[in-house]
Amino acid sequence: MSQPYTPAPRPARLARAVLLAAWAALTAGAVGFVVAFGSNAPYADEWEFVPALLGREPAGPWLWAQHNEHRLPLPRAVYLALFKLTHDFRAGMLLQVGMLSALSLGLMALAARLRGRPAWPDAFFPVSLLHLGHWENFVMGYQLCFALFTVLVTGLVVVALRATRETAFRSGVAAGTLNLLLVLTGGAGLAVAPPVCAWVVYLAAAEWRAGRRGRAAVLIGLAVLPPAYCVPYFTGYEHPPHHPPTSSDPVAVARVAAEGLAMAAAPGAPPVWAVVFAAEVVLGLATVRLLVGGPGGDRTSAFGLAAVAAGVVLLVLAVGHGRAAMGPGMGLWSRYGLLTWPLLGAAYLVWVRAGREAVPMLMCFAASLAFVPNTGTGMAVGSAVRAGYDRIRADVRAGVPVAALVDRHLKGTGQEGRAARGIPMLREAGVGVFAGK
């Protein structure tokens, strides 16, 4: 005999409906931003990729080629496949929105399971991941490398959150696999990987002590793959010639690292970065205290969460070390918001799991306050970016020569030589703005 259907309580159903409506609206807004302000044309560093995208140079070496401090075989493979399918630079922009939208939806569902019901503060996820303060990522398809990073690191957070001694092997396999994919996304992944590798070794030790030595060997194998990957990664590595030497000034490094952390919450409001950073430090310390002060015994999850957090902190310190010599404000780029966001997502989920609702409510409220300047900045910068490409399109249609196009629209960007080479290729291939489309 089948069990009678019991509908969900009205408050839970209402909260779920509100959350889904907010998620759908914010996803539509981000898609609309790409449609309105994105252009089928290279943006910034994408000029370097035009020959490979159009088949004018071999794809294999390009997939592995160093770009600034990075080798990005996984994002480049995805980016190349997208372009081959669409011949549209906006495909990467839309994929980023899709990844962040799916991540938001999944994290809302996870928070509801941890709590036992959905609650309106879970709107924190789409509000903080899909706002237009991420404009720098949304107008540049190649920034899907950062979106991939965010999804993979947040995946590690979820694995660590649910890990126990009993699930050590399953958690270790998941963490080791995600960690290996993470290092394939570039230098940011290399910074996060070491603490996660240490956690996977810790899980292997738990399996070894339990007598499951075959499983322990599998986990050790997964833990050593990211360090082994460093050998080919740094073979032939060169410091980017257009970057100044890395900084040895601890104050400058700390400042740029703090700026980068602040971008997790407010990439659209750089002037208040110090206030945002201070609030994040308070949140981080409170979250650590919650983890340390929790029930004793199985610390498997806490160690995993600490490993992921340590990895992201190492990343922002690496950003500070590499960018501090360029001067103050070098951590305030919008694109860094996605790299550091997993710390906020992890903190939110830890408090929800602990049944402490005040902090998630405050985080959602803060994200809602930041949404206004984030959106305003995104709209302003997006409009300016689109206006620039509209002027290029008008000049292309008017028959302005390539040299004049570069001089009028790309002078001072550092992309002049790449654009002078790439524009004729795009024109010949009939791609987007430079084909007069």
Image (cartoon, rainbow, N blue to C red):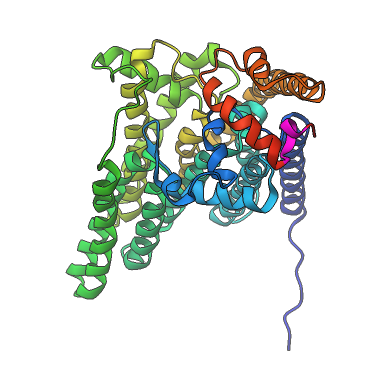
Please provide percent x and percent y for residue 326: 38, 13
Q: Which residues are magenta?
A: 430-435
Of 219 and 295, which appears nearest the observer? Answer: 219
Q: Main secondary structure of the magenta part?
A: helix
**Quadrant in which the N terminus appears:** bottom right
Look at the image and tell me whether residue 411 can be seen: yes
Above or below, 281 against 221 in this view is above
> Considering depth in this image, is 379 or 277 the residue closer to the camera?
379
In this rendering, position of residue 148 left or right of residue 91: left
Is residue 415 inside the magenta stretch? no
Nearest the viewer among 370 and 228 is 228
Left or right placement of residue 403 versus residue 191 in this view: right
Picture quarter with the C terminus: top right
Res. 362 in view: no
Give the quadrant of residue 41. Answer: top right
Foreground of the two, 311 or 431: 431
| Whole-percent x, y for residue 296 in the image | 29, 52
Q: Is 13 left or right of 359, judged from the image as shown?
A: right
Q: Is residue 431 magenta?
A: yes
Tell me how many marks there are.
Answer: 0
**x%, y% of residue 54?**
60, 44
Where is residue 71? Give x, y as percent.
39, 41
Query: Which residue shows up at 71% across the image and 18% down it?
Result: 384
Identity of the residue drawn at 63% across and 13% down = 407
